[in-house]
Image: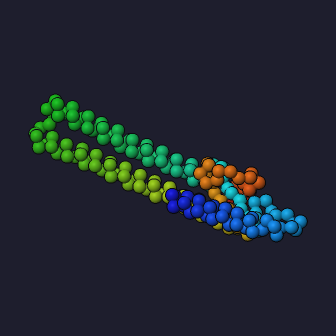
Amino acid sequence: MKKMKNLIMGLAALCCVMMFAQCAGNQNSQTTSEPVAQGSVSGFKVAYVEIDSLLSKYNFCIDLNEAMVKKSENVRLQLNQKAQDLQKQQNEFQTKLQNNAFLSEERARQEYNRINKLSEDLQTLSDKLQSELAAESEKNNLQLSDSIKNFLKEYNKTKGFSLIISNTGMDNLLLADEALNITQEVLDGLNARYSK
C-alpha cells in the first residue's frame, strides 16, 4: 500500500513538473483563441477520484464488505462457542481436582492433557480461520481494485485523460479544482456496470 502511495505521489509530482514546464514554454506561444479543456495543459488532461467516497458508495464494495462482516461474525461466534465449551471443561476439571474426584493421579493427568490439547486445537483453529479471513479480504481487495482499474480503462477511452489520480482523504491531493473531480461519474458507471 505504501509503495502504491509513493508511486502515485511520484506520478503526481512528475505531472506537476511537466505541467509547469509546458506552461512556461507555452506562455508566449498560446495566442490562439482555442480554449484549453479544464484540467489540461496543452492537451494534458488530469482528473481525480475520491477513493473514500467511491468505496463507501460502490455497490460491489458494499456487498463485499457485508459478506466479510457476516463471515467474520460467524467465525467470532464459532470461536466464542468453542472457547466457552473449553472454559466449562477447564472449570469442571478444576472442581474435580479440588474435590479429589479423580480415581488416580494418572487419570487426572490424562484429563489435564486432554483439556490442554483442546486448548491447542482451539488456538490452531482460531489461527486458521483468521488466516482464511485475511486471505479472503486480500482477494476481495484485489477484485475491487481490478474492477475499478478495468472500468477506468474503458471510461478513459472516451474521456482521454492523461492522468487520473486517486485521492484518499487529504493524502495525495491537497488542493484541486472541483471540476477535475470525476468521482460521481466513475461511481455511477461502476454501479451501472455492477448491477448488470
Which image quadrant is residue 158 in? bottom right
The extreme right residue here reads 33
Vertically, is 147 above or below 77? below
Viewer-side residue, 50 vs 173 = 173
Left or right: where does residue 31 sit relative to residue 70? right
Q: How many marks?
A: 0
**In this view of the protein, can residue 54 be seen by the observer?**
no
Which percent across, then down, holds residue 191? Answer: 69, 56
Can residue 79 be seen here? yes
Where residue 27 sits, quadrant-wise, is: bottom right
Q: Position of residue 7 (x, y in %)?
A: 56, 63
Residue at 68 percent across and 57 percent down: it is 48
Query: What's the colour scheme?
Result: rainbow
Identify the image quadrant of the C terminus.
Answer: bottom right
Q: Nearer the viewer, residue 24 or 59?
A: 24
Give the camera-side residue of 36 and 136.
Answer: 36
Which residue is farthest front?
A: 28
In this picture, is 111 found above or below 155? above
In this view, the residue farthest toward the top is: 99
Instruction: Give the quadrant of residue 181.
Output: bottom right
Query: At x 70% / y 66%, what residue is drawn?
Result: 21
For the point 10% across and 39% down, which residue is it?
104
Residue 160 rendering spot, x and y as whole percentages: 74, 68
What residue sits 82% from the left and 64% below the top?
36
x and y percentages locating residue 99 in the rendered image = 16, 29
